[in-house]
Image (spheres, rainbow, N blue to C red):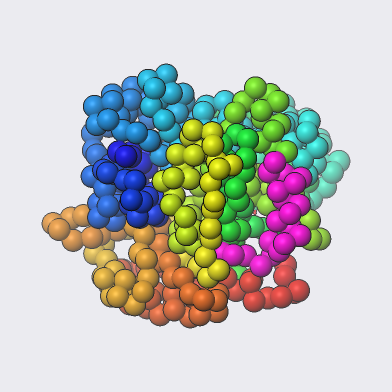
Amino acid sequence: MNVLIIGGGGREHALAWKISQSPKLKKLYALPGNPGIEEFAECVSGISTDDNSAIVNFAKDKKIDLVVVGPEAPLVNGLVDALEIAGIKSFGCKKAAAQIEGSKIFAKNLMKKYNIPTADFEVFDDLNLAKDYIRKKGAPIVIKADGLAAGKGVIVAQNLDEAIQAVDDMKNFGTAGSKIVVEECMVGEEASLLVFTDGKTIAPMVAAQDHKRVFDGDKGLNTGGMGAYAPAPIADEKVLRLAEEKILKPIVSALKSEGIEYRGCLYAGLMIVEGEPKVVEFNARFGDPETQAVLPLLKSDLLEIMLACAEGNLAEKEISRSSESAICVIAASGGYPGSYKKNLPIEGIEKAKALGALVFHAGTAKKDGKIVTSGGRVLGVTVTAENLEKAVERVYKCMEVINFEDMHYRKDIAAKAFAGSNRI
Ligand code: AMP
Ligand code: GLY
């Protein structure tokens, strides 16, 4: 098969790495790809990931059998719809289904209609009414922009002043913030559960836990994710069963009842509140960096699973998972998620690989044949081992051999897994 991956982050590097192991693969392309993906795929430049017709033409020209869409923006932008019209298969959901991530109001209303557990909420387009509601409800309280806001449209306000300020700040998100959701603040521990689905059957991957804040101890600003590990013990058997029965199967069939078939990867961001999962958010795609921890634990052929999702025969697939644990630690540019330097030479990637790590590129570029930094999240370093303790020990040894100026990484990825019942 000829396969085209859309995207160029750490998630797409992990997808390319795993897809390249498939005996079914003939040729892999990536748009735009990155210097790590280059090892497995021909990286394509000169086409924008939001130019649906150029991508369709490229796919026709190269006789692409499957397009794998990594990020949310092309999904929301209808890339899969455009490919379908041209008779090209995709792993990814269509525009209507991508609303589950693209519009918080769509997702919340759907959950309400079909009784899927989530935080209580109200929707406002009048910001003064939102403020009145917040004053009535009190803090802590959560304020969200409706549309995609590059992960910045959610504010968990600890007091009333912060909450009122958050409502005013929603104006900064343009159309994404013209309508807002105000919701109950859930208290618990989070887990990310990613599932493959063909719109009828769901096949969950191993549950992961992301670390969104920039500093140890969940301090500092929210980021795209500073590290992840899997399986996450907070998502025990009971939580997984409840998530499957009360959240994942119901949401896929709810979408179907609304005339929307969801195919691809569905990501449920869960809050485990007193042993029961509630939905924080849905994403219409693989998580980043969850994918870099979850895919190394997938034993089955990813390309076959993706094709089964696209063709609607996932029920016939046996999916096997490794019993090992995996951890991915992100090496970020100092200053991220604020401003940071670029073009800094990166050392030690090969050394870390020699120690057994998978080094996934995210914000990297090639300059004069050398790998340099080019983004906030630079590398995702993943180690798998027979248990999480060993994986943690080994991944941090690998982090010590990687270096670039001002490199920052969290030293406590997976610490919550060992915190037992004292979880916060
Ligand atoms: P999002 O950008 O939608 O992933 O949200 C960012 C983060 O905000 C989530 O990972 C949670 O930590 C937090 N969050 C969102 N909604 C709630 C909620 N209702 N209660 C508590 N925390 C929340
Ligand atoms: N790691 C969070 C996300 O992919 O949305």
At x 66%, y 67%, the residue is 233
| Region of the chain picked out in magenta, as a range | 224-249
Q: Residue furthest front?
A: 316
Question: Taking 257 as reference, is 423 above or below it?
Answer: below
Q: Where does the N terminus fall, quadrant-wise? A: top left
Spot occupied by residue 46 in the image (x, y as percentages of width and height): 23, 34
Res. 269 in view: yes
Spot occupied by residue 137 in the image (x, y as percentages of width and height): 84, 43
At x 38%, y 27%, the residue is 88
Q: Where does the C terminus fall, quadrant-wise? A: bottom right
Most foreground residue, 122 or 46: 46
Query: Is 53 part of what is drawn in magenta?
Result: no
Res. 215 in view: no
Spot occupied by residue 293 in the image (x, y as percentages of width and height): 49, 61
Q: Residue furthest right?
A: 136
Left or right of 417 on screen, residue 137: right
Q: Please identify the quarter of the rendering in which residue 212 is found.
A: bottom right
Most foreground residue, 59 or 267: 59
At x 64%, y 76%, the residue is 418
At x 27%, y 52%, the residue is 40
